[in-house]
């Protein structure tokens, strides 16, 4: 059995990779319990200074695999005003995402990561570059533009990363990449990550990487042992709708006992809380629990007083439970063997089992990798609709009614039917009774459709080799990739040697600005408690002395409410609301990880 660690200890498994304590602490805070295969291999290699050629798709944890060694170098070397790392990515979305990840991991170091991509006003980027950034995450076109203007200085570069190299080449960025690499210091360290090793990728690797160490993840991992009786299904759902989709799937599938796997402790805790608040009986199992707590959780699960066990891979390893009807992957696991371990919990001893995976559109390719590794089909299904749910509820009610009729003992009820039968048709009386039962069983989310995510028109949905785009398509994609859909942001942590933003008038809190990133909070009370938006704004604004306008969208539902607040004050708002009452009641308040704030 895996030894449990107490909360706050350094992430087990990451300790041996040679990372600075502050970075390990970051990972613990994020709830990462152990490195993924690509991280286990790439991190020590990159820290040792060699070039790396890695075949790994999105979802394998490759961002941290190159970001952590970059941050390690930042932690151990003298800081300069010029960037020490350049990460090239195919699209603006990825630029923002990777910059955000670097910022998140490098927070305790005060690392400054700047995403740069085309279409956004160049002045903002110029100002940010001038102030000094440590790590630039850029699309090739805009990077080259800055290099030619001499606004992106490459003299201090220690590491260059080409992320999703196959995508960049498919999009027609080959020349730009070569021009950029030629302009970087020749003694730089280079890492190239790509989901496929098409000839074009190998050619650029051969030209610009020096004696690279190679890593190959996922596609040809030999794994076996998936029980043939396990039905494997995946739903492609946008992140913001995952929780709703999980609820819908659980309602349709009606598992007798299920394990739900998440990547991090933080996710496990948040999901468990949300599931419990939505009326499921869920318990969390992760490395932050002590042995006694784990034993208690397992006992309840075995005794069927908990229906859903929400767990990380690490915590679930070694536990033995016989009767799991469903395994749910709340995220696509980072490697096929982890998928196999997880779903091996169901379909035991010849029983039938169901393995359900919720994948974001960008994780589609990971599913294909798992399929080719396990040589088993994962059926992609549409998230059940409101109509599906209604049909399922009616079927269940019909079965229950049948049982009740067979069981008899209906004398007391017969009187009610008889009295109504003099006035109405018996068929209508029965139909109305069914309606009441179904309505009582329905939750507040049952009327909302969950959007089906269009699968990315990218590599994910395409065959893995051969020409993919016509030159025209390529040009269009490159153009789209460079166009921003959001204002550019500088990921900036508190850093003593850099000037802070100018102070705002004294009546308002200096940290709240209208353009700030928002975080959604969950409040455990809604319409049923007669809560109105004004009550929430009032509670926050009164307690914290901030302007009401700083608070974002508010949504009041039957049993809970959602409010968007600036991320910089989110924790404070949670603390304050937990310490106060709304409509005279103390309510559950926490970050809502199941949905994203509206932009
Ligand atoms: P990537 O493949 O880099 O896009 O990462 C996929 C997802 O896995 C991201 O949401 C990461 O935050 C998450 N992740 C990366 N490494 C780990 C880890 N060691 N443990 C848990 N989650 C991770």
Image (cartoon, rainbow, N blue to C red):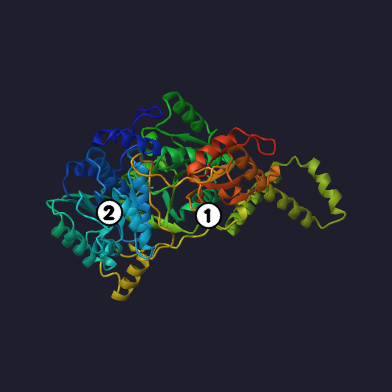
Q: Which residue is mark 1?
A: 598
Residue 306 point in image, percent of width and height: 53, 35
Residue 362 point in image, percent of width and height: 38, 57
Residue found at the far left of this picture: 211
Q: Is residue 355 above or below residue 312?
A: below
In terms of depth relative to the viewer, which is nearer, 197 or 322? 197
In terms of depth relative to the viewer, which is nearer, 393 or 207? 207
Q: Is mark 1 within 8 Å of ligand 1?
A: no
Residue 187 point in image, percent of width and height: 13, 51
Numbered disc 2: secondary structure: strand
Q: Is 313 positioned to the left or the right of 471 in the image?
A: right
Q: Earlier in the sequence, mark 2 or mark 1?
A: 2
| Residue 583 shows in this picture | yes
Numbered disc 1: secondary structure: loop
Q: Tell me what residue is drawn at x 23 percent, y 65 percent.
A: 176
Q: Is 275 positioned to the left or the right of 220 in the image?
A: right
Query: How many tags in the picture?
Result: 2
Q: Which mark is residue 384?
A: none
3D distance between C-alphas at marks 2 and 1: 28 Å
Quarter of the image for the N terminus: give it.
top left
Q: Is residue 352 above or below residue 11?
A: below
Q: Is mark 2 within 8 Å of ligand 1?
A: no
Residue 141 point in image, percent of width and height: 29, 65
Residue found at the far right of this picture: 422
Residues packed near mark 2 inside 10 Å, few (<14), some (14 to 19) or many (20 plus):
many
Q: Which residue is mark 2?
A: 87
In terms of depth relative to the viewer, which is nearer, 455 or 139? 139
Q: Tell me what residue is drawn at x 57 percent, y 35 percent.
A: 576
Mark 2 and mark 1 residues within 8 Å of each other at the beta carbon: no
Residues packed near mark 1 inside 10 Å, few (<14), some (14 to 19) or many (20 plus):
few
| Residue 370 shows in this picture | no
Q: Is 163 positioned to the left or the right of 449 in the image?
A: left
């Amino acid at each position: 059995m895996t030894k449990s660690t107490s909360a706050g200890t350094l992430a087990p498994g990451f300790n041996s990779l040679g990372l600075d304590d502050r970075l390990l602490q970051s990972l613990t805070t994020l709830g990462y319990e152990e490195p993924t295969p690509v991280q286990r291999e790439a991190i020590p290699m990159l820290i040792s200074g060699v070039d790396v050629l890695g075949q790994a798709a999105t979802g394998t944890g490759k961002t941290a695999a190159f970001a952590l060694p970059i941050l390690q170098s930042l932690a151990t070397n003298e800081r300069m005003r010029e960037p020490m790392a350049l990460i090239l990515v195919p699209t603006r979305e990825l630029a923002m995402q990777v910059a955000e990840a670097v910022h998140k991991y490098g927070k305790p170091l005060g690392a400054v990561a700047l995403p740069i991509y085309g279409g956004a006003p160049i002045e903002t980027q110029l100002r940010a570059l001038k102030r000094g950034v440590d790590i630039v995450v850029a699309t090739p076109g805009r990077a080259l533009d800055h290099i030619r203007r001499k606004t992106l200085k490459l003299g201090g570069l220690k590491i260059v990363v080409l992320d999703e190299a196959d995508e960049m080449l498919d999009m027609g960025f080959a020349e730009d990449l070569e021009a950029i690499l030629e302009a970087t210091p020749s003694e730089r360290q280079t890492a190239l990550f790509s989901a496929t090793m098409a000839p074009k990728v190998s050619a650029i690797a051969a030209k610009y990487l020096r004696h690279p160490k190679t890593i190959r993840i996922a596609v040809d991992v030999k794994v076996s042992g998936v029980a043939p009786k396990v039905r494997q299904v995946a739903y492609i759902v946008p992140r913001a709708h995952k929780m709703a989709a999980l609820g819908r799937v659980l309602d349709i599938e009606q598992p007798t006992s299920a394990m739900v796997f998440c990547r991090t402790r933080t996710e496990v805790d948040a999901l468990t809380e949300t599931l419990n608040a939505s009326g499921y009986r869920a318990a969390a199992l992760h490395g932050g629990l002590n042995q006694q707590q784990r034993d208690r959780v397992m006992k309840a699960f075995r005794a069927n007083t908990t229906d859903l066990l929400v767990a990380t891979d690490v915590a679930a390893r070694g536990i033995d439970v016989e009767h799991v009807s469903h395994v749910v992957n709340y995220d696509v696991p980072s490697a096929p063997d982890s998928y196999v371990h997880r779903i091996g919990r169901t379909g035991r001893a010849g029983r039938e089992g169901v393995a359900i995976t919720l994948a974001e559109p960008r994780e589609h390719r990971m599913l294909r990798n798992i399929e080719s590794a396990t040589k088993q089909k994962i059926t992609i299904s549409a998230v059940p609709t409101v109509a599906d749910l209604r049909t399922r509820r009616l079927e269940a009610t019909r079965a229950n009614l049948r049982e009740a009729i067979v069981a008899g003992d209906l004398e007391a009820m017969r009187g009610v039917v008889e009295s109504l039968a003099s006035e109405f048709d018996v068929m209508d009386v029965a139909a109305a009774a069914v309606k009441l039962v179904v309505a009582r069983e329905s939750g507040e989310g049952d009327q909302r459709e969950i959007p089906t995510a269009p699968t990315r028109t990218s590599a994910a949905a395409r065959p893995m080799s051969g020409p993919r785009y016509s030159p025209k398509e390529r040009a269009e994609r490159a153009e789209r990739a460079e166009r921003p859909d959001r204002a550019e942001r500088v990921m900036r942590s508190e850093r003593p040697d850099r000037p802070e933003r100018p102070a705002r008038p004294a009546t308002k809190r200096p940290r709240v600005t209208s353009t700030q990133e928002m975080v959604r909070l969950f409040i455990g009370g809604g319409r049923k408690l007669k809560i109105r938006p004004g009550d929430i704004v009032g509670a926050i604004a009164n307690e914290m002395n901030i302007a009401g306008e700083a608070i974002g969208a508010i949504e009041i539902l039957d049993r809970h409410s959602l409010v968007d607040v600036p991320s910089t004050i989110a924790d404070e708002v949670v603390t304050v609301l937990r310490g106060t009452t709304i409509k005279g009641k103390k309510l559950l308040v926490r970050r809502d990880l199941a949905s994203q704030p509206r932009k």
